[in-house]
Amino acid sequence: MTQTSNRWRDFPDYIIGITQEIWEGRGIATLHDHYSADIPVRTPMGVARGNAGVIAATMATLQEFPDRELLAEDVIWSGSAQTGYLSSHRIISTGTHTGDGYFGPATGRRFQIRVIADCAARNHVIDDEWLVRDNGGLVRQLGQEPRGFARGLIARAGANPPFTPAGDIAGPYTGHGNDDPWGARYADTLGRLMRADFAHVTTAYDRAVIAEHAGARSLTGHRAVGDAWLGLRAAFPSAEFKLHHVIGREDPLMPPRAAVRWSLDGMHDGWGMFGAPTGAPVHVMGIAHADYGPFGKEGSSIRREYVLFDEIAIWQQILLHTGDI
């Protein structure tokens, strides 16, 4: 592809290649070239502007997890060289906690979680980003619990407040994905689940679906997947569900698949996966991927699903509201 120079076979190869170059290749300085100087980077933990912050965070992470690897699992993308691209890059992140840092004193423990990064790129440069890391799954594997870890973050001087739309920074990317039917189909499924149509899982998902959800939870079967979505929605029953970006794709050697960036914005006003309702205002930033297969009542259904949101960021918002710190 011309946008990312002759080094790369195509846009997914570019995204995968620069990620490996930065992390495993220790080419941290290349972030000056790969990321724009004023890039907005949004995570559930907050929003920052500029590649200087990305460079600092990358160095801090590698100090804490020196053997960290970011293994590309998929890149679901949309756009063109003329309009710019958006990649929804799903990563298996592994490492050993051998250095003190953000996640506390070194434990020597290994972790394996997923990360999804939505990156907008234009003219060889990434200039807008939304990233969700399964921090809840990570801290559990380091021997902690998300609620307690969130409480510790609040106690730290200078801990950043979690991301909310009110604190967002406008970036150059204004796209909403593409009009591929697989993306529209998955967006419709998520919308129906958020409207409490949990019976829809028997139609939308393969009976043998395998799903990886936040908290490093591996789920098998559409009943387990439906229960996981119910647990999230039950915690925020009146929250507004929004679709922010929807991509569908069919590519050689790959199943039809979809990537959806979404949010819940409202109150913690129900019993669900975050315990007793507190009335806390909460924003949930989520990204989900789905792969489709040939089985199901409609001739195809979701065979694999990957759902990420940050439990720690949600607990921070709840604890800051209740004062339970």
Image (cartoon, rainbow, N blue to C red):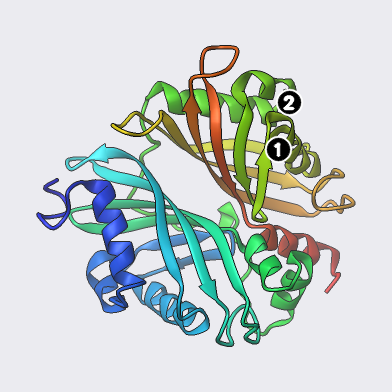
Q: Mark 1 points at which residue?
A: 229
- Report the amino acid beneath label 1: Trp
SS for dot 1: helix
Give the image quarter of residue 139. bottom right
Question: Is the residue 153 above or below the residue 48 in the image?
Answer: below
Give the image quarter of residue 264. top right
Q: Mark 2 points at which residue?
A: 198
Query: Image point 45% across, 77% down: which residue?
Result: 67
Q: How far across and how far down the image is residue 308, in percent?
A: 58, 50
Label 2–label 1 contact, CB within 8 A = yes
SS for dot 2: helix
Query: Image point 60% across, 22% down: which residue?
Result: 204
Lateral position of residue 83 relative to residue 188, left or right: left
Lateral position of residue 228 relative to residue 126, left or right: right
Q: Nearer the viewer, residue 321 or 301?
A: 301
Query: Image point 30% across, 55% down: which residue?
Result: 15
- Report the amino acid beneath label 2: Phe
